[in-house]
Amino acid sequence: MIEKTDRSGKGFRKLIVWQRAHQLVLQVYKLTEKFPKHEMFGLTSQLRRAVVSVSANVAEGYAAGGKGQFKRYLDIAQGSLAEAEYYLILAQDLNYITPSQYEQAETLRAETGFLLHRLLESLDRK
């Protein structure tokens, strides 16, 4: 799907999956600004770390070289995305975010997951 010679220009930033993951990071940072201060080193940190890991692993995997390495990083990104899914559920259950905020974040998280899955499928076909 992406060849070494195709890495000119924007690099990983041209990947739609990275763009969605980055949007999720920005959204989560805004949401977590309103979390209780006692969660700064708890849920706030964990949720932020999980979503940042998704976009960072897409970027790092893209730059890593071969298809096998890229797939490995995408697998890690999928795990981080699943972790973020739970943290969003927890944040809603603790009333740190509203149901509407949860739905917006979860929709973006699910879209990112779908795109990650499709990218992994495309790499398997090559």
Image (spheres, helix red, strand yellow):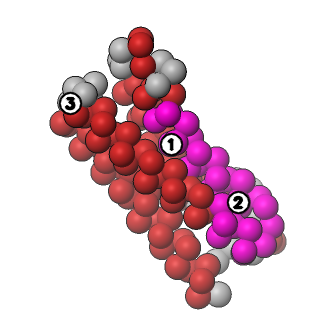
Query: Which amino acid, by three-letter code, is at mark 2?
Result: Gly
* Residue ID for mark 1: 51
**In the image, which disc is placed on residue 98?**
3
Q: From this viewpoint, is residue 14 visible?
A: no
Query: Which of the two labelled residues, at mark 3 and mark 2, occupies the earlier sequence position?
Result: 2
Q: Quadrant of the N terminus?
A: bottom right
Left or right of 65, for residue 99? left
Query: Residue 61's mark?
Result: 2
Amino acid carrying mark 1 in the image: Val
Name of the residue lying farthest toward the left: 99
Q: Amino acid at mark 3?
A: Thr
Residue 45 part of the magenta-drawn span? no
Q: Residue at x 43, y 60 (%)?
A: 113
Residue at 43% x, 29% y: name it: 43
- Sooner in the amino-acid sequence: mark 3 or mark 1: 1
Magenta-tinted stretch: 46-73
Task: Confirm or deny contact between disc 1 and disc 2 (CB under 8 A).
Answer: no
Q: Nearer the viewer, residue 22 or 53?
A: 53
Tell me how far mark 1 sits from mark 2, CA to CA: 16 Å
Q: Is residue 113 left or right of residue 80?
A: left
| Label 1: how many Cα within 10 Å (few below 14, some 14–19, many 20+) | many
Q: Residue at x 41, y 11 (%)?
A: 37
| Mark 3 → mark 2, Cα distance in angstroms | 34 Å
Disc sitting over residue 119 in the figure: none
- Secondary-structure class at tag 3: loop
Q: Is residue 74 above or below residue 124?
A: above
- In the structure shown, which secondary structural element does the residue marked by tag 1 occupy? helix
Residue 116, image x, y percentages: 50, 64
Vertical relation: 113 (above or below) 13: below
Magenta-colored stretch includes residue 68: yes
Residue 9 placed where, x, y %? 74, 56
**Is label 2 in a helix, a strand or a loop?**
helix
